[in-house]
Image (tube, rainbow, N blue to C red):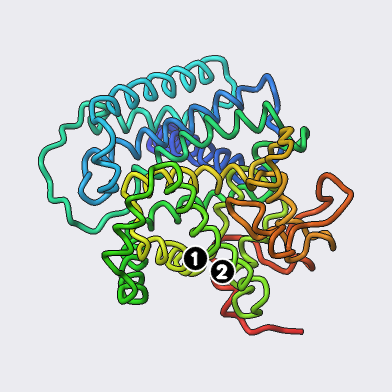
Amino acid sequence: MTTSDPTPAKQKPLDQTLAAPAKMAKNVIGDTSRILQDSGDMPTGRGMVSGSIAFTLGLLCLLGVIAFHFPEYLTTPELRKQYSVDVLRHVLFAALCIAGGLSLANIIRGKARSLSIVALAMVAIAVALGGSRVPVGDFPDHTPYIGLDWFILDLLGSTMIFVLIEKMFPLYKGQSIFRKEWQTDMVHFIVNHFLVGLILLIVNFMIHRVFGWMVHGGFQDMVRSIPFIPQLLLCILVADLMQYWTHRAYHEVPFLWRFHAVHHSAKTMDWIAGSRMHVLELVFTRVCVLGPLYVCGFEKSVMDAYIIVVGFQAVFNHANVHLPWGPLKYLAVTPDFHHWHHSSDDAAIDKNYSAHYAFLDYLFGTAVKTDRQFPEKYGVVGDYMPDGFLKQQAFPFKKQTD
């Protein structure tokens, strides 16, 4: 007569019970990771649109709550003075409700479940950490920081504004929001925002070192005496003249081109493509452009307005947008004008350098001359730039092979 040991029979269900949540979590994370690595149009009727919105809002809400906990290290000093904490609390609460509601509805309906489970988990963690009620006390104002708040606000605002504009007035109607290589550009977008504090520190230091000896109080007083609108137009002109020649040097000096080629490697143009840039180019260009503005001593209100203009154009001119510009296209840089600069068509090589005033390229003889309205292809000629943020940052320092 034999008897079976009851322990294995009892232990097996227990092992399965413990393993089930871990397996489910692994599957959810794996499915979400695959979705984030994918590109192309989102299928309709599967909850992907609402799931993506819930995931994005859930992530931004979680980051926002963390920023509320550590404002001295995670928020930008210049922005702290501009926005209301109470308004941000209301926005955060609304975003938590929307993300939670969309993700919960998808889970109940069985649509985009993996993405929605991760979104709901982020909402739950954000709420557990205090949600929109995290207290903010006094804190020192001169600590090292990363621009987490700038990243959150800019990503939220950019997607709401520029994605809508791209869908209303597309240049290429069939282009997907999540086009190929969007992940690489998103990493550039994130890093550029998170490093804003360090970049500004380096830029300010170099500006004072390189341009400080040129500052003359009498000249600055004369510039500040100019009325606001003409002073703003002059500010943009000075900036764009420096931008033009710096930009042209990137194209005509082989060593500098290796850094600038990172920016030109995007093969699809949309609002986030302009974020693709080598960090050293970002620093060098800001020093070359902001240095002369510092010497001129423009009014703070003028500089604030210029920052808004350059911030908008830097995104808008890369966007997948086409509008009937009329004669304005010969005066100001538009997406049509700047798209040609990013084209790898023969007619577009080393053309259209201006960032604000298109007439500078016509003046200096570098405007694109072609009968075609739009470019056929984008990117660097030869398509030699590797994909991925780290590889692109390392590219300029690698030995060239012919």
Q: Position of residue 134 (x, y in %)?
A: 20, 31
Is 237 situated left or right of 42 in this image?
A: left
Disc sitting over residue 246 in the figure: 2
* 215 vs 78: above or below: below
- Residue type at mark 1 is Thr
Which quadrant does the C terminus fall into?
bottom right
Please give the label number shown on residue 193.
none
| Foreground pick, 311 / 281 | 311
Q: Secondary structure at mark 1?
A: helix
Q: Is residue 391 visible?
A: no
Q: CA distance from mark 2 to mark 1?
A: 7 Å
Residue 278 visible from this viewpoint: yes
| Amino acid at circle 2 | Thr
Q: Element type at marker 2?
A: helix
Residue 220 occupies quadrant: bottom left
Which dot marks residue 285?
1
Residue at the extreme right: 371
Residue 242 % position (x, y): 52, 65
The answer to whether the residues at label 2 and label 1 have Cβ atoms under 8 Å apart is yes
Q: Position of residue 330 (x, y in %)?
A: 70, 47
Query: Residue placed at 51% from the left, 67% from the top?
Result: 281
Q: Nearer the viewer, residue 77 or 244?
A: 244
Name above or below for residue 111 compared with residue 334.
above
Q: Residue at x 66, y 52 (%)?
A: 358
